[in-house]
């Protein structure tokens, strides 16, 4: 299709409009023609459309997320993402026309030419990515918010480390300690109950970083076990710069675990289910507890160090 300042949707055969959409570049704007609907996008002197203006066109009107191929449109030119197409029962949310299977190829093509900053630019990410690579980066961006590491509830709070620390202290009443060694005693009157999986989360401030010590009970297959492990409040690469040890014992016996703390980017359940920590089977835990073995009394000691 040739550029023509007087071109309108009526100049394009209807059969062609149903299959796709077209872009017309004039001085000062990009005009997107789609079944009688024209979108104008300001362009700069080099003929490139404003990223902000184009990005607005690539925002799904239903979920407000960025649209990625296949981008769908109704016969009147209203667009929406493929995820929302099913949610609106194949009817356009704007004009209620049946959607069918029309692709907005022109908008998909425009997206290919875009380079946009990471959505976490405001909190420090300096990266700029092609439109179709931006989403993949943002899913792994080191500046993306952290999820609350508290395992006792399905907590949905997210934020930077400072926000998460304040949330753990104020909302979950988590104990905060300074130091790189710990000595904790865990007592449970009925060790045969494992339904309440999370017993304790403690946060340590050590080497200017924060670490989460978890101790909990759960079923490993059909066998009740107790597990202690450490998570680092930061990125995985930083976590690899530290090591830790855990020790539990009694009656002249001792179990020792040494490992590398896992980042809180790894979900609590993922770490637990990988058995990456000190695991104590219930019979051994009761043996360590002494007495009549009707009450669990475990003392877990440990330390954190910085790898050279």
Image (spheres, rainbow, N blue to C red):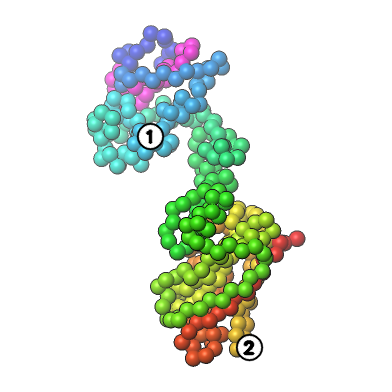
Q: Is residue 171 above or below residue 111?
A: below
Where does the image place residue 136, in percent across and percent down from the top left? 51, 43
Q: Is residue 65 above or below residue 150?
A: above
- Span shown in magenta: 13-34
- Viewer can see residue 7: yes
Quadrant occupied by the N terminus: top left
Gap in angstroms between the C-alphas marked 1 and 2 = 65 Å
Q: Please rate how many residues cluster around mark 1, counting C-alpha atoms within 10 Å: few if below 14, some from 14 to 19, many from 20.
A: many
Identify the secondary structure beneath mark 1: loop
- Check residue 292 in the rendering and tell me which mark sits there, or answer none: none
Dot 2, how many residues are within 10 Å of its Cα: few (below 14), some (14-19), or many (20+)? Answer: few
Q: Is residue 90 left or right of residue 155?
A: left
Q: Residue furthest right?
A: 308
* Residue in the picture at 53% in, 17% down: 44
Q: Nearer the viewer, residue 65 or 74?
A: 65
Quadrant (top left, top right, bottom left, bottom right) of the C terminus: bottom right
Mark with earlier residue (1, 2)? 1
The quadrant in which residue 153 appears is: bottom left
Q: Which residue bears the numbered disc 1?
A: 60
Where is residue 32 shown, x and y percent of the image?
39, 20
Q: Is residue 261 left or right of residue 159?
A: right
Q: Nearer the viewer, residue 252 or 55?
A: 252
For this orientation, the residue located farthest to the top is: 6
- Report the label total: 2
**Mark linked to residue 252:** 2
Comparing labels 1 and 2, the label whose residue is closer to the camera: 2
**Image point (49%, 88%), residue name:** 293
């Amino acid at each position: 299709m040739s550029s023509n300042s007087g071109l309108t949707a009526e100049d394009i055969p209807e059969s062609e409009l149903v299959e796709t959409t077209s872009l017309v570049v004039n001085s000062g704007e990009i005009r997107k023609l789609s079944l009688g609907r024209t979108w104008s996008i300001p362009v700069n002197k080099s003929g490139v459309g404003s990223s902000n203006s184009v990005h607005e066109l690539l925002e799904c009107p239903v979920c407000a997320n960025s649209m990625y191929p296949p981008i769908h449109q109704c016969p009147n030119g209203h667009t929406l993402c493929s995820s929302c197409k099913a949610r609106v029962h194949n009817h356009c949310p704007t004009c209620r026309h049946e959607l069918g299977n029309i692709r907005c190829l022109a908008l998909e093509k425009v997206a290919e030419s875009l380079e946009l900053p990471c959505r976490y630019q405001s909190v420090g990410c300096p990266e700029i990515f092609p439109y179709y690579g931006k989403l993949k980066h943002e899913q792994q961006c080191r500046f993306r918010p952290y999820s609350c590491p508290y395992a006792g509830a399905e907590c949905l709070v997210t934020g930077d480390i400072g926000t998460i620390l304040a949330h753990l202290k104020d909302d979950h009443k988590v104990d905060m300690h300074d130091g790189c060694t710990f000595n904790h005693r865990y007592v449970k009157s009925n060790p045969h109950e494992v339904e309440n999986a999370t017993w304790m989360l403690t946060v340590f401030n050590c080497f200017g970083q924060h670490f989460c010590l978890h101790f909990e009970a759960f079923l490993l297959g059909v066998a009740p076990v107790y597990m202690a492990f450490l998570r680092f409040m930061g990125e995985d690469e930083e976590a690899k710069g530290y090591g830790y040890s855990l020790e539990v014992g009694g009656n002249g016996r001792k179990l020792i675990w040494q490992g590398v703390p896992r980042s809180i980017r790894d979900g609590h359940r993922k770490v637990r289910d990988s058995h990456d920590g000190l695991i104590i089977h219930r019979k051994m835990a009761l043996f360590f507890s002494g007495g009549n073995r009707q009450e669990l009394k475990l003392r877990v000691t440990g330390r954190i160090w910085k790898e050279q």
